[in-house]
Amino acid sequence: VFSYKIKTPLLEKEVQRTYADFEWLREQLVLKYTLRIVPFLIKENNLLYMDVIDKNDSEEIMEAKKIKYLSNFMEKIIERKIFRTSPIIYEFLDLDDEKFKKYKDKLNKNKYELNVTLDNLRTNKDKIHCEINQEYIKSADIFNKRFNKLNELYQKLEKSLVDICGVFKL
């Protein structure tokens, strides 16, 4: 758990959050603001490979580098008004650990319910699509039958005209 202090011209907060909480925050922002670019956050297990931390660093230096990296991440988020004014950010920075955990659980539950609803919608869409296809096939069959009937009538009319014209030929 990090003791994380953020200072910007707009905001000064200190919160205790895990690295996973920051990853969760970014995921929530990506989900909520789908047409916005959310600052990138390297997964914690990739920090070493991305040269954020060094394997030769002491534990204290590694933690300090992580906190600096997370501070930069939060600074980039808070620079953008749309994120700065987001309820997700306020909850992330204002709630104590227990309330924040409940807030996360609530959002994750809503996300699950939304996914279930979307799955139901997809299933219903497939049913509707199938019903529409069946109606289309019925309509196409009716159209073909009517077209064939009209075509038969046209051919009879054309034959009758040829017969009539043949009678009047000189």
Image: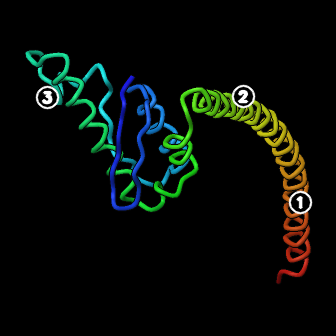
Answer left or right for 111 relative to 127. Answer: left
Specify the amino acid type for callout 2. Val
Specify the amino acid type for callout 3. Asp
Q: Where is residue 76 in the image (x, y as percent from the top left)?
A: 32, 51
Earlier sequence position, callout 1 versus callout 2: 2
What colour scheme has been applied to the protein in the rendered image?
A: rainbow
Answer left or right for 119 relative to 101. Answer: right
Q: In which quarter of the image is the N terminus?
A: top left
Q: Which residue position is annotated with label 1? A: 150
Q: Which residue position is annotated with label 2? A: 116
Answer left or right for 34 relative to 115. Answer: left
Q: Which residue is drawn at 17% across and 30% down?
A: 52
> SS at mark 1?
helix
Nearer to us in this view, 123 or 96: 96
Specify the amino acid type for callout 1. Leu
Q: Nearer the viewer, mark 1 or mark 3?
A: 3
Nearer to us in this view, 15 or 27: 15
Q: Which of marks 3 and 2 is in front?
A: 3
Asked if 96 appears above or below 132 in the picture, the reply is above
Earlier sequence position, callout 3 versus callout 2: 3
Q: Which residue is drawn at 30% across and 42% down?
A: 71
